[in-house]
Amino acid sequence: MMFDIDKEMLPRDELEALQLKRLQNLCERLYANVPYYRQAFDECGVKPGDVRSLKDLARLPFTEKQHLRSGYPFGMFAVPRETIVRLHASSGTTGRATVVGYTKRDVHNWGELMARCLCAAGLGPADFIHNAYGYGLFTGGLGVHYGVEHLGATVIPMSGGSSKRQVQLMRDFGATGITCTPSYAMYLHEVGMDEGIDIRDLPLRVGVFGAEPWTEEMRQEIETKLGIDALNIYGLSEVMGPGVAQECLEAKCGMHIFEDHFLPEIIDPATGRPLPPGETGELVITTLTKEGIPLLRYRTRDITTLDYTPCICGRTHVRMGRIIGRSDDMLIIRGVNVYPQQIEAILVQEEGIAPHYEIEVSRLENLDHMEVRVEITEGMFASDEVRVMLEYERRLQKAIKDFLNITVKVRLVQPRSLQRSEGKAQRVFDRRNES
Ligand code: AMP
Ligand code: ZN
């Protein structure tokens, strides 16, 4: 199924002509309205008028998360504040989150692109879609919500949490589609079984899952356990939110990036050089139509490949593979982005703690768990009782919860008990893909 055949099946030459026109317009807008870009263009020695073909993209400056942070909160906006109708912010960051703003047209386009995604997944106006992505500053909930309405289907705005109730309402309302993280889908299956509700027996047919990395094996497991088709969706708040790319039901093989709105590249993360089609590297996205906070060559830090071979579904838009890693050390814990340095920043504020810590992430009953092991100093080890230690652990747990809004287990360990390394310390152990 296709939401917009004309655009989704646009012949490649026409698509590229459209991209070039939009890229030229984007460069003009950025140069005129965003100080960061004016300076970056000048430093690269290019003017918007120099962009004559898509190949010229490689001469243009990148945008990185730090540029959004340093412009906090609205420094990268390209339109007057009165034309912004909505704000979102990236999850789990420090006081300097990345804030994104949408104009009316941005919100409209987002709804349309999300509708394309749902449609590509086999959902249509007759469907009931249970949306368990979090509502709020995170883009997942509202992004999907407007997409369902744009499609003309029925949205059930559940948000996250209250898992028992989620499964009961899935049964009572007869949802035919579900949107959430893949790990939460697995968790809902288990909660359902405990409640005597086997999701396989419900009308649920399709799941659109994203916001965290997952694997083909996990797809198989979800499809079998829930009795549905499980499809991958990709997006990030800086670029828009969910709906940047979506797998089609026909091929289930890579996510079509909506290239009339987003211009993708793959670069070598170390050198910044564009890589030839088919190679694995960091995904870079230029937003071609966004007004509120348009971005030129945004470095997503997500590692993947692009596949330009034709797809059996008929869409002409390129397909991106699963995200196989990050070119930075960001972790995604239950959908929240977490950088190890954020944890470190909290730990160093505490007295009695040595600057040695380890973070271990594992998956228990399909949910992410994070344990932070911290060495205490000799002085503290000599003097303190168990009760004090427990109190200390609780205080650190609370500090992390307050700061990052994730629940972690903090464990204080004896001085010198954590492994030391001679080179780059390995502090993060992600064991989620080990069974
Ligand atoms: P946020 O800005 O909070 O929406 O987080 C965006 C990040 O989530 C992306 O840069 C990816 O690292 C990750 N992400 C989103 N969708 C997927 C997906 N389908 N597979 C793997 N990672 C994803
Ligand atoms: Zn396809």
Image (cartoon, rainbow, N blue to C red):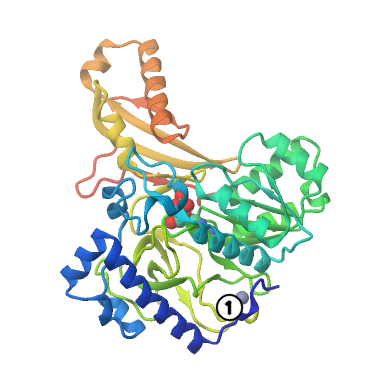
Q: Residue at coordinates 26% horizontally, 10% vertically from top-left?
A: 383
Residue 416 visible? The answer is no
For the residue pair 8 and 363, the one nearer the viewer reads as 8
Count of numbered circles in the view:
1
* Picture residue at 65% right of the left edge, 68% below the top: 120
- Location of mark 1 (residue): 7
Q: Position of residue 427 (x, y in %)?
A: 32, 43
For residue 132, say whether it is visible. Answer: yes
Q: Please say if 368 is above or below 146.
A: above
Residue 84: % across, % down: 44, 52
Whether label 1 lies within 8 Å of ligand 2 gets the answer no
Residue 189 relative to residue 424: left or right: right
Assess disc 1: are there few (<14), some (14-19) or many (≥20) residues with their C-alpha within 10 Å of its C-alpha.
Answer: some
Which amino acid type is shown beneath numbered disc 1?
A: Lys
The quarter of the picture where residue 418 lies is: top left
Q: Position of residue 201 (x, y in %)?
A: 83, 50
Q: Viewed as shown, does residue 286 lie left or right of 229?
A: left
Classify mark 1: helix, strand or loop: helix
Image quadrant in which you'd find residue 340: top left
Q: Quadrant of the N terminus?
A: bottom right
Q: Residue at x 25, y 77 (%)?
A: 59
Residue at 53%, 83% (x, y): give it: 309
Percent x, y for residue 283?
39, 67
Q: Nearer the viewer, residue 113 or 380?
A: 113
Q: Is residue 288 above or below residue 89?
A: below
Q: Nearer the viewer, residue 92 or 292?
A: 292
Question: 273 above or below 177?
Answer: below
